[in-house]
Image (cartoon, grey):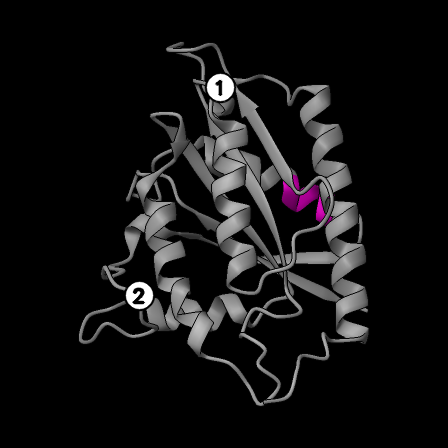
Amino acid sequence: MALTAIALNCTLKSDPAQDSSTDRMIGVLRDSLAKHDVTLSETIRVAAHDIKPGVTSDEGPGDAWPALRTKILAHDILIFGGPIWLGQIGSVAKRVLERMDAFLSETDDKSRMPAFGKVALAAIVGNEDGAHCSAQQLFQALNDVGWTIPANAACYWVGEAMGSTDFKDLEHVPDKVQQTADMAASNAAHLAKLLNQAQYPGVSG
C-alpha cells in the first residue's frame, strides 16, 4: 500500500532560499520513510505563507491556512518540524496548532475529527535544551485534535547551549539521530498502513 507524507517546516525563516536545520531534519525522516515506501510529496515553509491568527479553519480574505489545511489532510503522515526557541517549540509551530484547534468542532457523524486515522511525527532542532518539552507540546496538541502518535515519534538534535553549530552545519548525521529517524519512520509507516486498513470506529451521537 503506497503511503504519502507531507512536512511542515515551522522555522522562523520565511524565505525558502535560506538554509534551515529543520529542513535537514525533515530530510532525514524523508529518507527513512522512503525505505518503507512512503513518499514525501512536499515540504511547506510555513512562515512563507500568510496564516492568520485564530482558531477557525478560515479566518477570511488573505488567509493561507484553508489551502494548507486541505493539503495536510490529503496525506497519511505529517512530519511536523520546528526549532526550539526559549526552551520550547517556536511561535510558527504554535500558530499551526492553534489553527488545528478548529478540528475539535469539525467532526463527522461518528464524532471523528478530520485528522482521525492520520499519523504525526516530530522533527525538532535547536542549540539549547527543550527537545523533550517541544515534543510534549506538539504531541499533546496534535493528539487533542485527532492525530495518532506512534511510538518513538520524535526525532531531534540539540547542539551545545548557545553554540554556533547548527544541525545543518554537521558534516554527517549522528548515528543516534539516524537510528531514531529509522525507528520513527518504521513505526509511522506501520501505523499508517493499519489505520488505512481499519479506520477508528468513532462513536454515535
Q: Main secondary structure of the magenta part?
A: helix
Point out the stretch of residues depicted in magenta.
29-33
Give the numbered dot on residue 69: none
| Residue type for callout 2 | Val
Q: In the image, what residue occupies the spot 29% across and 43% down?
A: 15
Residue type at numbered disc 1: Asp
Taking 86 as reference, is 118 above or below it?
below
Using the rendered image of the protein, determine whether residue 173 is visible from the camera's viewpoint.
yes
What kind of element bears circle 1?
Answer: helix
Is 5 situated above or below 105?
Answer: above
Q: Quadrant of the N terminus?
A: bottom right
Q: CA distance from mark 1 to mark 2?
A: 36 Å
Q: Is residue 201 magenta?
A: no
Residue 103 percent across, percent down from the top left:
45, 71
The verdict on residue 30 being magenta is yes
Q: Residue at x 72, y 42 (%)?
A: 184
Quarter of the image where the C terminus is located: bottom right
SS class of the residue under badge 2? loop
- Residue drawn 36% across and 38% down? 90
Which residue, given by chain and number where applicable, does mark 1 sit on? 169
Q: Which residue is mark 2?
A: 55
Left/right of residue 63 with respect to residue 176 in the rendered view = left
Residue furthest toward the front?
205
179 left or right of 129? right
In the current view of this chain or complex, which residue is farthest to the left? 61
Q: Pick whichever of labels 1 and 2 is earlier in the sequence.
A: 2
- Left or right of residue 202: residue 108: left
Q: Is residue 80 visible?
A: no
* Between 146 and 93, the one nearer to me in the picture: 146
